[in-house]
Amino acid sequence: MKNVHAAAKPGDVFAAVGAFLTEHALNPEPANYALAYDVICDPNGSRGREVQALTLGGVRLSGANVVRLGGVASAVPLALVPSAPAREPAPEPNRDDALVARTLTQIVDFATTLQTIHQETNHFGRDLAETAEAIRNGGAEGGVERISRLTAAMIARVHQAETRLEQATTETAELRAALEEARTIAGTDPLTGLLNRRAFDDRFAALSPDVPVALAICDIDHFKRVNDGFGHAVGDRVLTLVAQLLEREVECTVARYGGEEFALLFERCGEDDVVARIEAARDAVVARRLRDRDSDRAIGTINFSAGVARGFAGDRLNPLMERADRALYAAKQAGRGRTIVAP
């Protein structure tokens, strides 16, 4: 939540309050302005903290939430409130394409810099050889002037080389940062911000073979019902919320493994500890009372089933995942909303 202190410019506070009212479909009632102002300017206050908890995962405040917080629930659609005409957003460039183009440009520039420095070095050797030959043929006295000119030229070239080396060092750092950014993007699920399947597999592969591990697969129960009943935008918000709560509660490596499935990697944790963390995450998910932002309809209780397999990193990922998947299937068959550990 954006924190705009009361000491900020009045325009900043007004804009933030207006954005809050629009986001939660609240009419411009004085009580709603007071609620929004309190939340924006004092996010760590009682109402600020409660709103943050209620809206975790992008959930909109319900009418009942607003009334309990001291506001006025909207009785008419927000569309009836005058507002500035919407502008068509400008298309955003593809981030991956831009990153690839920038990285390739830096590689070309770096290669050019190295080639130039190499050419300068070759010139040093050639000029020194010519000067040595002139001294041998004309004596030291005849070579003094030439040595003086060569020294001045070499000093100038050294300065140029130092500048180019400094430039090459900067370009190398930029290139390294760009490649690290690309690696991070490639390993991140764009919806939830969690690791994706490839990054999760890489994280497992990096473990020492003798490390005891537990792998868990968590699958949201009846997720198709959410997508079919409320649309994929609501489904995406539910996925994001579950991802946030899992990451907060289980305190281990968490990845979105595909669809509504999440993979968890525990290192050096006992079975009871693993199950307790998963159950804590389930309690946090079930405790949420989610509503559709647009219709204010209750989405219903969200829950998930989990299957766990224990072993060592040296047991390889696929066999462990297969055991966890079988345990997950058993949890679904047993009525869902539970965790089963593979034998």
Image (tube, grey):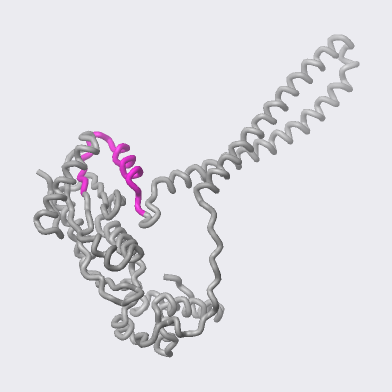
Residue at image location 14% in from the left, 58% down from the top: 336
Residue at image location 62% in from the left, 33% down from the top: 111
On screen, residue 82 versus residue 216, left or right, reads right
Please state the extent of the stretch shown in magenta in the rendering.
194-216
Query: 267 or 246, which lies in front?
Result: 246
On screen, residue 104 versus residue 227, left or right, reads right
On screen, residue 97 versus residue 25, left or right, reads right
* Residue 280 image offset from top left, x and y in percent: 20, 61
Q: Quadrant of the C terminus?
A: top left
* Residue 308 image offset from top left, x and y in percent: 17, 48
On screen, residue 244 versus residue 147, left or right, reads left
Quarter residue 237 falls in: bottom left
* Residue 313 image offset from top left, x and y in percent: 23, 37
Quarter residue 133 falls in: top right
* Residue 101 image offset from top left, x and y in percent: 57, 44
Query: 226 or 269, which lies in front?
Result: 226
Q: Is residue 274 above or below residue 172?
A: below
Residue 201 highlighted magenta (yes or no): yes
Q: Is residue 74 above or below residue 99?
A: below
Residue at image location 21% in from the left, 61% down from the top: 222
Query: 152 or 332, which lies in front?
Result: 332
Q: Residue furthest bottom?
A: 30
Residue 325 highlighted magenta (yes or no): no
Q: Residue furthest top?
A: 137
Residue at image location 22% in from the left, 50% down from the top: 217
Quarter residue 9 falls in: bottom right
